[in-house]
Amino acid sequence: MIYLDYSATTPVDARVLDAMKPYFSDSFGNPSSVHRYGQQAEAAVDAARETVARILNCRPDEIIFTSCGSESDNLAIRGAAYAMREKNGARWILASRAEHPAVTKTLLQLEKYDGFQIEWLDVNEQGMVTPEVVSRAICEETALVSVMYANNEIGTINPIRDIAEICRARQILFHTDAVQAAAYLSLDVQELGVDMMSLGAHKFYGPKGVGVLYVRKGTPLVPHLTGGGQEFGLRAGTQNVPYIVGFAEALRLTHEEREQRAAHVQPLRDKIIGTVLETIPNSRLTGDMNIRLPHHASFVFKGVDGNLLLTLLDAAGFACSSGSACKTGNPEPSEVMNAIGLEREWGLGSLRVTLGMGTTAEDVESFLAVLPGIVERARLLNHG
């Protein structure tokens, strides 16, 4: 089986696992305990926080450990929305139509149950949010803007620095979901200018079940998980020491090896894009051709059911992903496919191919050898 779904998750790096192991057994203490076991655990959490802060170019007390990127998104959006409403009555939130469901579904709940007004920002045909769109949408009642750093389905990278400048000039809080971006893009929050940024370790060879929310000092935030005073009072619950250690080690390795990793995957990705567009009729690349994540290739094929395509690829020994989703028994294009304006007959046939350090040139050649025939078969079955 050849794995081509690194945007879904990555294997844990052996070096990360080695760093985590002591905290499952010998150094198993609760960081909140005052005895020596607790002190050892607390020291490990503090060291991990300092490592993450150094890479993000921020203060350690601006790093909040969570259970995943989705929780980080929820804390940022709910926490800022409630805080800004309490501070000045602001109830308006802006977010792009192409955000991850951790953002969109959170916003829909805030709209339905808490009376917030959500304005969905249009994206262009490449799935990008332009600064001009954000600038036009901001009003006096805007509490928060949330725009993802890089899109999980189509790989497009948004102009986060420019959007952050606009928000800062208008004194509006700005959050970015950087879960997909972290493996290959700079996370320097001083350069990016963001107020909050979400991360998840399992996208860059760390463990599942741990994330981070960067919160700029002074950003108003109401905690939504309450109990003890962990994480500076913003996220209650006993800290998951081995996973926090794993997050920091995975991020450190990613930061140090980023250029090497990008140099490995980008030529392979370019090979896939060029060959697919050349050899498969009625195929299109989705996302920006150049301003995209280096490991990410995504396509749509006219007249193809994306879920059927994945099933056929899986049977042939390839693990990929699709943006289509089955709703009440009927396949529908994803919200991202709709946001970039694709017709239904195109949007249903999406395929995401994402590469990693385990991907070889032979893997890519094998994939490209079978994909045209599998797409053709999926078309025939779809219309049969």
Image (cartoon, grey):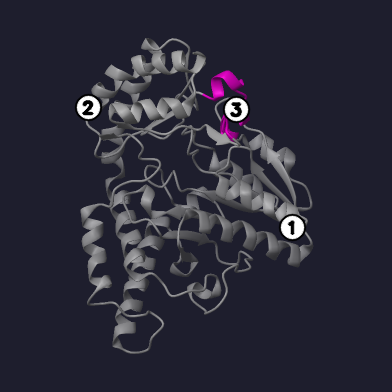
Residue bounds of the magenta highlight: 329-348
| Amino acid type at image mark 3 | Ile
The circle drawn on residue 361 is: 2
Determine which residue is flagged by label 3.
340
Q: Residue 209: image x %, image y %?
A: 40, 59
Instruction: Identify whether 184 is placed above or below 189.
Output: above
Q: Amino acid at mark 2?
A: Ala
Please say if the residues under marks 1 and 3 sit with CB atoms less than 8 Å apart. Answer: no
Relative height, residue 227 to residue 362 (above, below): below
The Cα atoms of the two marked residues, 1 and 3, are separated by 29 Å
Q: How many marks?
A: 3
When the figure is inspected, residue 360 is found, relative to residue 208, above or below; the finding is above
Q: Secondary structure at mark 3?
A: loop
Observer-nearest residue: 317 or 74? 317
Please rate how many residues cluster around mark 2, counting C-alpha atoms within 10 Å: few if below 14, some from 14 to 19, many from 20: few
| Left or right of 365 in this view: 85 | right
User: In the rendered view of the protein, which quadrant contains the N terminus?
Assistant: top left
Cα–Cα span, label 3 and label 2: 31 Å
Cα–Cα gap, marks 1 and 2: 50 Å
* Tag 1 residue: 113
